[in-house]
Amino acid sequence: MGDTSIIARRLKNGHVQYGWSGNGGYFKNVGNRLLWWYYVIPGPFRIKMPLELIKNRLDEDDYEFDFRDEVEAKVTSFILQDYQKYDSAFADFLKNKGYDAETILGEISEDGLPSSYKLFERYPYVYKYFDDWILIKTNADNTEISEIIVKKRSKKHVETCNW
């Protein structure tokens, strides 16, 4: 469990201002929220999503951890099962490395949930294929994930606000 989450907002001049949310890694308000735009799951992939999505998916104890696990699992499944539809070079990459997406998915799953940490540890070449930032888009009322945006790693990172 991380102690902080990265949050960010886009300024009128187009720059992105980043901040940190503390409270020992919990989604709680113990003071004024200076930034109320994005929540980022820290981990091998930094998964950026609207903070309202987290707020709308808190559990009965007002914690976000179960939903974070669900999001990470969806992202990892998307990378291994669906991303090839958008980037045929990824399918070739897996084949050239001798990897099979379904086998990887089985090896990195625990209790039916794929783990981005296990992907990172056991298949570093697959992890390194991607930009370490991933963007989550939501439906209009910020209650469901509508799109997962993953980019191939490039020499120069492009801010997620420009994806």
Image (tube, rainbow, N blue to C red):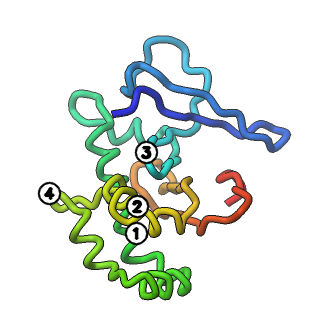
Q: Is residue 140 left or right of residue 26?
A: right
Q: Residues within 10 Å of mark 3 (few under 14, many from 20)?
A: some
The kind of residue tagged 1 is Phe
Identify the residue at horizontal 57%, vertical 30% (top origin).
36
Chain-order first, disc 4 or disc 1? 1
Chain-order first, disc 3 or disc 4? 3
Chain-order first, disc 2 or disc 3? 3
Q: Secondary structure at mark 2?
A: helix
Is label 1 or label 3 in front? 3
**Residue 17 vertical position relative to residue 145 in the rendered view, above or below:** above
The image position of residue 95, as x and y in percent, is 42, 87
Q: CA distance from mark 3 to mark 4?
A: 19 Å
Q: CA distance from mark 1 to mark 3?
A: 17 Å
Identify the residue at horizontal 61%, vertical 65% (top origin).
153
Q: According to the image, label 4 marks what residue? A: 111
The kind of residue tagged 4 is Asp
